[in-house]
Image (tube, rainbow, N blue to C red):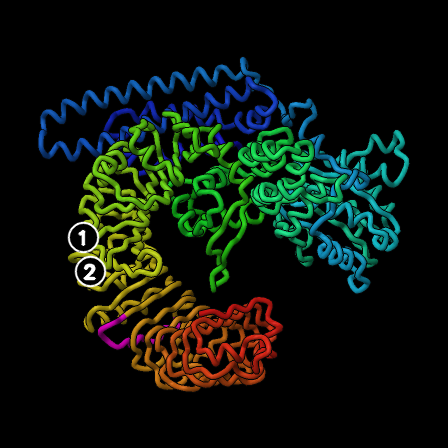
Amino acid sequence: MSFVESVIELLLKKLAEPLVREALFLSGVRNQVELLVLEFEQMESFLEDADAKQEGDRRVKRWVQHVRDVAYDAEDVIDALVLKMATSRRKCFIRRYACIFNNLIDLHQVGSEIQRINGKIHRISESKLTYGIENIGQGVGTSSSGLSLQEKRLTSPNAQEPDFVGFEKDLKALVWRLTDEGEVRRSVISVVGMGGLGKTTLTRRLYNTDSVKKHFQTHAWISVSQQFAARDVLLSLTKQYMAVTKEIRKMNVIELADNISKHLDNKRYLVVLDDVWTYEAWDALKIAFPEKMNGSRIVLTTRNKDVALHADAQSKPHELRFLNDDERWELFCKKTFPGQNNICPTNLQKLGREIVGKCQGLPLAIVVVGGLLSRKLEEREWENVQKSISWQLVKGEYRISDILSLSYKDLPYYLKPCFLYLGIFPEDHEFLVKELIQMWAAEGFLQERGEETLEEVGEECLKELIQRSMVKVSKTSSSGGIKSCSIHDLLRDLSISEAKEGMFLHVHRASGNAINTPAFPPPTARRLSIHHDVTSQYISSGHSTPHLRSLLIYTQDRGWVEKKQEKFLFRTFMLLRVLYLQGTFIKILPRAIGELIHLRYLGCSYTSLKSLPSSIGNLPNLQTLSVASSSYIIEVPSTIRKMKQLRHLQVKGIQQDRCWGMIKGHPKLERISNLQTLSFIKSGKWMKGCFGKLTHLRKIGICLETRAHAKVFYDSVVKLYSLQSLSVESVKHTLSLPPLSHLLKLCKLRLCGKLRKLPESNEFPTNLTKLTLDGSSLKEDPIATLEKLKNLQILRLHQKSYLGKKITCSKEGFPRLKSLNLQSLHKFEEWILEEGAMPSLLHLRINYCNQLKKLPEGMKPTLKKLELLWMPDKFKERVREGGEDWDKIQQIPSIQISN
């Protein structure tokens, strides 16, 4: 499905929302809207073919643009109608009769607008024949050279191979897997990675390696590609094995596959299927390859890890990495200076490394820019390329975007807006997964599937983009979930380019040339992301973009927002669904925020807010309210009880600062039945009678102020069976949690404050993977209990959580622990680590334990990272090279010892 289909799907979904249905009913335009829906549903059947055809036909492309424009137009009219109805209701309390008269005028105008749109849709629909849409077939985009991209991408095992850098270990590992005599079943070995990462280059070298050639009795190489015909591929494969007769040319797919299978029967064969995109492609071809127990192999290259696992679930895909700094420079020099011993002149090295850095380890990008610069030897020419590197790679002579865009075009319709939305983030930005998914949900990109929540659907969509090599995982959580991600700059540029063309998103950012002023977004822009140093310039301009659905500001200014700028932000963009402000120190959220009735996501980071206005309760659609402030307390008004769609209420401090939300009054939060996140909040009257009824809560961060509040919390938390993350803090009173072992989904637990006693191991959550104890003041060694937690992977003992002198980890203790952090345990002197303890430990951090004499014997050979911070001088002398404990740690790859 096409991107425009996703636009129509979002519009049809909007028309089914309760507030919209009510507004349409009251305005008397329901029949006209039903006609509009019918027209769009009929138009959808033509859009998939039109989307495929538009790459090579400007008429078709123009027709698709007309469909998109009228869908946007309809969305604007509907959203404006809902806004007018809501505004009128508030005004009617003051001026009743004038309000009724004005409403009649407004409703007449709305009816006329929808009638106009219906006429426009009808004319567009009738123009299908004029634009050549009626009987179009599947089209393939062509390049400026006249060759289709499909034809340009066909590969051969004998093609001239570019410089081979950085794949030596990959090649060795794959040769072993191909020639392993112990694996006798016919297996599929997949090479996976994003476009331009070198899958074909590596596979070609593998295919032509002598030991591989000698190992197999017969070999074949087939380029499958995105738009493939099974019969053509099988016929091409047949030509590599035998002469093609007239009878063979007449065979159908099944007959050709059977013919190949007979030829390969009882032979140990190697077949490379290069550039496989779909399950269907593999399923159509696999019948040609007999499954004999003779060590035959199929090598498959793909951008989609799911396709690799579908082809052979027992064979782990070989995932390619990006080149490291040394490999990047070596490849660049080989490509740029082939006749000069691959040595870059001294005066060009700084510029060269800056240019290579922009390629972010993608071999194709390095090869392209190296070829470009091989014809440019002047420093001034290199400076020009450095300034325009993104343009050179995406839209220049070689158009890497053509190759990368194949991944975008292969996305199902529901993933296209999700991918395009990634362009909102600044360059090299590592985005939080939960934040992104909440924005996707606010935009309407996600639809609940059965009993899955929007958040769970969003996680699946993100995982699919990761499996398709379009998003990189940056950090994972203790439970194995994905915590943060990033996107390669070239894919980001692709998302921005595609989004801008479809009026989906405009990014307002400083130009590479500081003299140039960045272009303002067109008035029709639907989403706007402002980056870095141009925020004040844009706000001060008063530039009109009334159709915005998302406004996101990422600035490094961190300056105070003036009254005039506040008015611009909160009164100009009345149709916003997402408002995110990072780096703008807002002192007060104005009452006008309550007029943005379409708002579903409100995020304010780097603020100095002390309270939220009561008008925030006028946002009936708000799903996420996330505020990070430098204040210690943010007052949350009782009017939040009216926000029945609220799913996430998040109050955070800036960096290491603490910030708590304080809910005023007794707002009866049980009315917010979908609430999933409540952090970080101080306890209060609001808890009584409601806390145990918030059964959808998955994450809680709470500070217990009184013993009475603590009792209410303890009685309620045991009923929250959906809970996944729990952080409990108490400064004034001792913590005494009830047994939580029955909360099977609870995997993260943080206890901050004195503990009456450490719970028994069978009282902790059964599936606990991460535990933090902070200020617990335990006198008995907690390890004796905690090492029995079978699923624990991360343990943090912080800030006097243990007051004893000795810690003992016994044999077979902590079977799955991967990370251990010991911080500010000021009486801790001796650590005994018995043989067999912590067999899976990867990361150890000891910080400010000023009485610890030495590291224990039997440091784990599994350790990959060791951090020793703010430790006594005598301790540091022992662990430095040549010291008494150096032999315990010298095998660890990453060691950090610092003050």
Q: Nearer the viewer, residue 332 or 178?
A: 332
Does residue 494 appear to the left or right of 117 in the view shown? Answer: right
Give the main secondary structure of the magenta stretch. loop
Does residue 582 appear to the left or right of 184 in the view shown? Answer: left
218 over 684 or under it: above or below: above
728 over 779 or under it: above or below: above
Q: Residues within 10 Å of mark 2 (few under 14, many from 20)?
A: many
415 over 805 or under it: above or below: above
Instruction: Check residue 829 for magenta coloring.
Output: no
Provide residue 703's location: percent of width, then percent of height. Answer: 26, 66
Screen quadrant of the C terminus: bottom left
Q: Residue at x 41, y 28 (%)?
A: 519
Q: Residue at x 32, y 80 (%)?
A: 777
Mark 2 vs 1: CB contact within 8 A: yes
Q: Which residue is under mark 1?
A: 638
Q: Which image quarter: residue 521? A: top left
- In the image, the segment drawn in magenta is 730-742
Q: Nearer the viewer, residue 75 or 107?
A: 75
Does residue 435 appear to the left or right of 490 in the view shown? Answer: left
Q: Residue at x 50, y 75 (%)?
A: 790
Name the residue type under label 2.
Trp
Of the numbered discs 2 and 1, the one sitting upstream in the chain is 1
Screen quadrant of the N terminus: top right
Name the residue type under label 1.
Ser
